[in-house]
Amino acid sequence: MEIKVLFIIGLLGTAGYLVGRGFIKLGLTGILGYLIVGFILGPVFKLNIPKGFGEIISSFTLSLVGYTIGISFSFDFLKEMGKKMVIVLIVEVIVTSLCVFFFIYLISKNLPLSILLSSLSSATAPAGTIAVLREWKAKGSLT
């Protein structure tokens, strides 16, 4: 691995950690701090990330989140929550897709674009949501 790639990993990790901790001390979620660090270090300073590096980091991060979620579930929990989870999933996909469709169509009046973006909108990764739920120690039937 090149020194440049290791430097980028170290810079992103350190800055994200420090800014995230600062946001937590302010009573905000650390995820917001991580997003701001990515925003600042990316386009503002024109950080030149090697081709394919973003996909590697995204895949690694999502695999860690998936692993963390997976070890917190039990078969009893899944049996108990199965129907509720399916209902929530279906409602989330439908509501998200419809909202994106209507807002995009309202703004652009472009039907094909509205359909395309609404179909993509429901396929989001849960990493940010799960991280916020864990950080705030949310408890309830759906968390």
Image: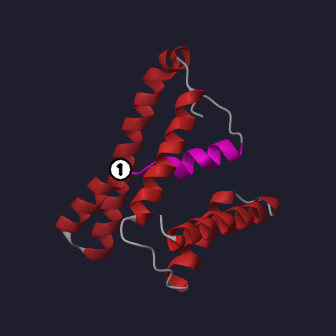
Indicate the position of residue 52 as horizontal and vertical percent values: 36, 65
Q: Which residue is mark 1?
A: 122
Indicate the position of residue 23 as horizontal and vertical percent values: 75, 64
User: Left of 13 or right of it: where is 25?
Assistant: right
The answer to whether 71 is drawn above or below residue 109 in the figure is above
* Residue at screen point 36% across, 37% down: 90
Q: Quadrant of residue 137?
A: top right
Q: Quadrant of the C terminus?
A: top right
Q: Residue furthest left?
A: 112
Which is nearer the eye, 78 or 43?
Answer: 43
Q: Helix or strand or loop: what does disc 1 sit on?
A: loop
Q: Name the kind of residue labelled 1 in the image.
A: Ser
The answer to whether 63 is drawn above or below residue 118 in the figure is above
The crowding category of the residue bearing disc 1, from other C-alpha atoms within 10 Å (few below 14, some 14 to 19, many at least 20), is some
* Residue at screen point 57% across, 44% down: 130
The answer to whether 139 is drawn above or below residue 126 in the figure is above
The answer to whether 48 is drawn above or below residue 140 in the figure is below
Which is nearer the eye, 116 or 127?
Answer: 127
Magenta segment, which residues?
Answer: 123-136
Q: Quadrant of residue 72?
A: top right
User: Left of 63 or right of it: where is 37?
Assistant: right
* Residue at screen point 69% across, 46% down: 135
User: Left of 22 or right of it: where is 102?
Assistant: left
Indicate the position of residue 116 as horizontal and vertical percent values: 23, 61
Q: Residue furthest bottom?
A: 45
Q: How is the image coloured?
A: secondary structure
Residue 74 in the magenta stretch? The answer is no
* Residue at screen point 50% across, 69% down: 5
Identify the main secondary structure in magenta.
helix
Residue 128 in the magenta stretch? The answer is yes
